[in-house]
Amino acid sequence: MSNECRTLPVAEPARLEAIELDDDLAKRCVELTRSLVLRFSGLDLRVPEEGDVVCFEANPCPAYAYYEGHTGQPIAAAVVLHLVGAAH
């Protein structure tokens, strides 16, 4: 098995931005995470203006700091609040 990693050319790099998920999609994301027996996951979604949402992966250990830095979302604070609440 090779340890080689190749990057495929893309027409346009991925755009990272915070979006508000509708209630149905948010519920489906939570259900997916729970079905994988995870408390958290990073879901890579493609959310087109029209058409179906596509989930590329559910990552059990996403780079929260990277996404927080690129989107300005308070991810670390939300994780801490969740964990503190779960400890009670």
Image (cartoon, helix red, strand yellow):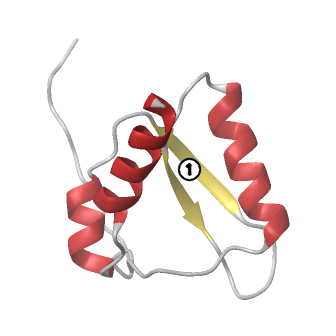
Total labels: the figure holds: 1
Give the percent coordinates (x, y) of residue 59: 44, 39
Label 1 environment density (alpha carbons within 10 Å; few <14, some 14–19, many ≥20): few
The residue drawn where x is 63% and y is 53% is 55
Residue that mark 1 sits on: 56
SS class, disc 1? strand
Residue 8 is at least partly visible in this image: no
Measured along the vertical axis of the image, is residue 42 above or below residue 35? below
Q: Hey, which quadrant is residue 23 in on the image?
A: bottom right
In the rendered image, the residue lying farthest to the top is 1
Relative to 26, is 36 on the left or the right? Answer: left
In the rendered image, the residue lying farthest to the left is 3
Viewer-nearest residue: 80 or 41? 80
Q: Hey, which quadrant is residue 32 in on the image?
A: top right
Residue 72 is at least partly visible in this image: yes
The residue drawn where x is 38% and y is 77% is 16
Give the percent coordinates (x, y) of residue 62: 34, 45
Quadrant that contains the N terminus: top left
Viewer-nearest residue: 5 or 61? 61
The residue drawn where x is 30% and y is 81% is 72
Relative to 87, is 64 on the left or the right? Answer: left
The residue drawn where x is 21% and y is 62% is 66
Relative to 31, is 17 on the left or the right? Answer: left
Measured along the vertical axis of the image, is residue 58 above or below residue 1? below
Viewer-nearest residue: 44 or 42? 42
Viewer-nearest residue: 24 or 88? 88
Measured along the vertical axis of the image, is residue 18 above or below residue 60? below
In the rendered image, the residue lying farthest to the front is 88
- Indicate the amino acid at tag 1: Phe
